[in-house]
Image (tube, rainbow, N blue to C red):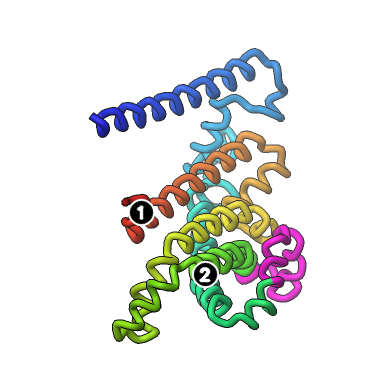
Amino acid sequence: MKRLLATIRKGSRTIQALLSLVLLLVLWWGTTAAGLINPLYLPSPQSVWSAFVEANSCRPQSPGSSRIICGEQQYFLWQHLVVSLERIGIGMLLAIIVGMLVGFLLAEVEWLNRIVLPYINFIRALPPLGYIGLLIVWFGIGDTTKIWLLFLAAFPPIVLATLEGIQGVNKDRANSALSLGASRFKAFLFVIFPSALPSIMNGIRLAVGFAWTTVVAAELNNGIPGIGALAYLSGTELNTSLTIACIFVIGIAALLLDGLIVLITKLVTPWVGKD
């Protein structure tokens, strides 16, 4: 009975979400169809969909022209998205590896914690545009700068989550494992790390969100191909339909990435939320 009620509630929430989306689309369509807002500022849903389709297909450069162009900025929209995901993937991978190692060190070495932690919080508080100019001076305008920017966006949350997770482990568990003959490495691997893993995964989830919201800033300079750069350039060219299409793609990709992290978290920490 409880399972049935839970299924009904879940289905009800899904229906409510779909209805709200339909209502938003109807209001959007009605506003643009009535001409209440200049299409330059708010194009119709049909116009945005057409821009999305054109950005993923080939077409004549102009009516009657024999020259065929494909996508936008010489790439299909999905190719822009894939390149941005690749950049974020590299930046996130580096942030996870380095962030977890630094978090473990700060949790184990108290004097190092006192020295390094203020700088981690300082980087966390800085907006990406605050140091993108310095990264360009150091590394140029290629992908290295973009990956560094995404790394710096994701690195602090992972360090802090790892540190919090290690410090929150029940010391009695680790001491019990050591008293039963386990080495410090085995105690860490089988007791401390699994206990800290839920906090670490929450930090990775936050880090992915921070990195993805930084994608536009990362791709402002020489970001083509890249979904953030396409959104920016289409805005500067007053191609509002394509800009909104890019925004939708960025948002949907963010939701899918978040859902993927939640799924991975449930797979690697199946004990969380269970008595």
Residue 207 shows in this picture: yes
Q: Residues within 10 Å of mark 1 (few under 14, many from 20)?
A: some
Q: Quadrant of the N terminus?
A: top left
Question: Which residue extends farthest top?
Answer: 34
- Residue 107 lies in the magenta stretch: no
* Snapshot quadrant of residue 91: bottom right
Helix, strand or loop for disc 2: helix
- Identify the residue position indicated by label 1 in the image: 266
Q: Which residues are magenta?
A: 118-145
Helix, strand or loop for disc 1: helix
Q: Residue at x 53, y 32 (%)?
A: 50
In the image shown, does 196 or 232 lie closer to the viewer?
A: 196
Q: Position of residue 121 (x, y in %)?
A: 68, 66
* Snapshot quadrant of residue 222: bottom right
Task: Give the dominant element type of the magenta stretch: helix, strand or loop.
Answer: helix
- Residue 144 lies in the magenta stretch: yes
Would you place residue 198 above or below residue 39 in this image?
Answer: below
| Mark 2: amino acid | Gln
Question: Which residue extends farthest left?
Answer: 1
Q: Nearer the viewer, mark 1 or mark 2?
A: 2
Q: Earlier in the sequence, mark 1 or mark 2?
A: 2
Would you place residue 251 above or below residue 144 in this image?
Answer: above
In the image shown, does 153 or 135 lie closer to the viewer?
A: 153
In the image shown, does 264 or 70 lie closer to the viewer?
A: 264
Q: Residue at x 58, y 58 (%)?
A: 211
- Identify the residue position indicated by label 2 in the image: 167
Would you place residue 248 above or below residue 200 in this image?
Answer: above
| Mark 1: amino acid | Lys
Q: Position of residue 139 (x, y in %)?
A: 68, 74
| Horizontal side of residue 109 vs 36, given as left or right | left
